Image (cartoon, rainbow, N blue to C red):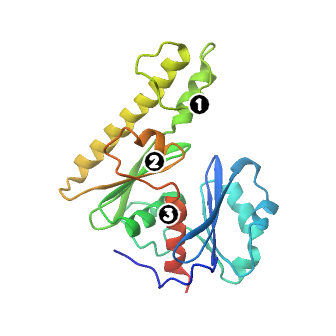
Amino acid sequence: MPRGPSPTPKSAPEYLLIDISNSFTKFASASRDALRRVSCLPTPGLTRRAFASMRRPGQKIVLSSVVPDKARLALKAFAREAARGLLLTVSPSLDLGAGIDYPRPSSIGADRLANAAAVRHLYGAPAVVVDFGTAVTFDILSPEGNYIGGVIAPGLEAMTDYLFDRTALLPRIRPSEPASAIGKSTRAAMLAGAVYGYRGLVREILAQIRRELGVRRPLHVVATGGYATLISARLPEIKRIHPNLTLEGLRIIGNLNFH
């Protein structure tokens, strides 16, 4: 399994890790071998000043973004670090510790590359990362440890918000564990449809991925993202939940590419 350089003492917050997603942005300080403090801010409200305020002298910065305008703000905020070679923006050209076997590597989201780096390093291959964000994404590593593709489906909140936005009488709901599959109110019926239906979506996609991989050895299935705990609770197909998997991937990419 790929390994980064030898770790420095845990007291050294060597990295600032930034994962910009559509809804929220996570920031973490980290040493070479562990995440330290993790914070989260709504992505729409981020400014250049907000990015700059996270910076600490001497830190190396690893940036992943799926929101181009916020990425541009971050690059402006960290222009001095970039000029000194202290900024990495995640892309397929970096050493990820995992190969890429994909027709257009440049079209792979930076967060998905970070997830691939993390799962390869922490769990091995073959593997599937299920990331429950604004969209739910499935990222697949072959038995050889190569990123070979994935699946993108609507996120859980996107599905429930769509019903609220497009109907006159259905309320907005906050997904949580249903009391029963048979709803005794409109809200309870929506909750059952959302959570049980979403688990069915995830289960069927994982089953199809497993069939197409055709592997007999154990398949590592790791969940991350906002609704990972809720949806994975009744899905035996998902063996592990790692809330900060993407940030771990950024830390690993930092280890592999900063020298």
Report whether residue 79 is seen: yes
Residue at 51% of width from left, 73% of height from top?
253
Q: Secondary structure at mark 2?
A: strand
Seen from the viewer's position, the closer of residues 11 and 207 is 11
Asked if the residue at tag 1 contacts the one at tag 2, i.e. Cβ–Cβ closer than 8 Å, the answer is no
Camera-nearest label, 1 or 3? 1
Name the amino acid type tagged 2: Thr
Provide the residue designation for mark 2.
137
Would you call the spot at circle 2 few (<14 residues within 10 Å), some (14-19), or many (20 or more)?
Answer: many
Name the amino acid type tagged 1: Arg
Provide the residue designation for mark 1.
174
Seen from the viewer's position, the closer of residues 169 and 105 is 169
Percent x, y for residue 16? 65, 70
Percent x, y for residue 250? 54, 68
Asked if 69 appears above or below 87 in the picture, the reply is above
Residue at 65% of width from left, 54% of height from top?
25
Asked if 201 appears above or below 247 in the picture, the reply is above
Mark earlier in primary sequence (2, 1)? 2
Q: Secondary structure at mark 3?
A: helix
Mark earlier in primary sequence (3, 2)? 3
Left or right for 203, reference 244: left
